[in-house]
Image (cartoon, helix red, strand yellow):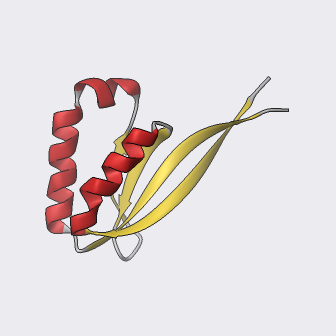
Amino acid sequence: MDEKKTRYEEFRVSGSEILEKIKEIIREGNARRIIFKTEDGRTFMEIPLTVGIVGTLIAPVWAAIGAVAALASNLTIVVEKETRDKP
């Protein structure tokens, strides 16, 4: 049976790069959650990326990400991914 493991990737981006990086992450399709952290490491916002949210609620998500991009100069984007390990 496949065992699911969670791994995290971090990206440091400036305000102008946030939307493009998020689009890239969503296109890859294997992200479960995106976490935005401030320069001092505090969680600023978390966005779950389930099929339902990507399919039906994308406009409000883009609006929220756009607001983050406008307010932030430098952020760390943490991407939570679930992978399967075969025995």
- Going 39% across and 53% down the picture, which residue do you hit? 35
Tell me if I can see residue 3 in this picture: yes
Rendered view: 86 above or below 26: above
Q: Position of residue 30 (x, y in %)?
A: 50, 38
Q: How many marks?
A: 0
- Of residue 13 and residue 35, the one placed in the foreground of this image is 13
> In which quarter of the view is residue 52 placed?
top left
Side of 51 where 87 appears, left or right: right
Side of 83 where 39 appears, left or right: left
Rendered view: 46 above or below 68: above
- Going 14% across and 56% down the picture, which residue do you hit? 67
Image quarter hosting the C terminus: top right
Q: Position of residue 59 (x, y in %)?
A: 16, 35
- Going 41% across and 47% down the picture, which residue do you hit? 25
Rendered view: 2 above or below 31: above
Side of 51 where 73 appears, left or right: left
> In which quarter of the view is residue 36 placed?
bottom left
- Going 18% across and 48% down the picture, which residue do you hit? 64
Image quarter hosting the N terminus: top right
Q: Position of residue 85 (x, y in %)?
A: 75, 37
Q: Position of residue 42 (x, y in %)?
A: 38, 67
- Which residue of the protein is positioned furthest toward the right in this rendering? 87
Side of 82 where 79 appears, left or right: left
- Of residue 20 and residue 43, the one placed in the foreground of this image is 20
Tell me if I can see residue 45 in this picture: no
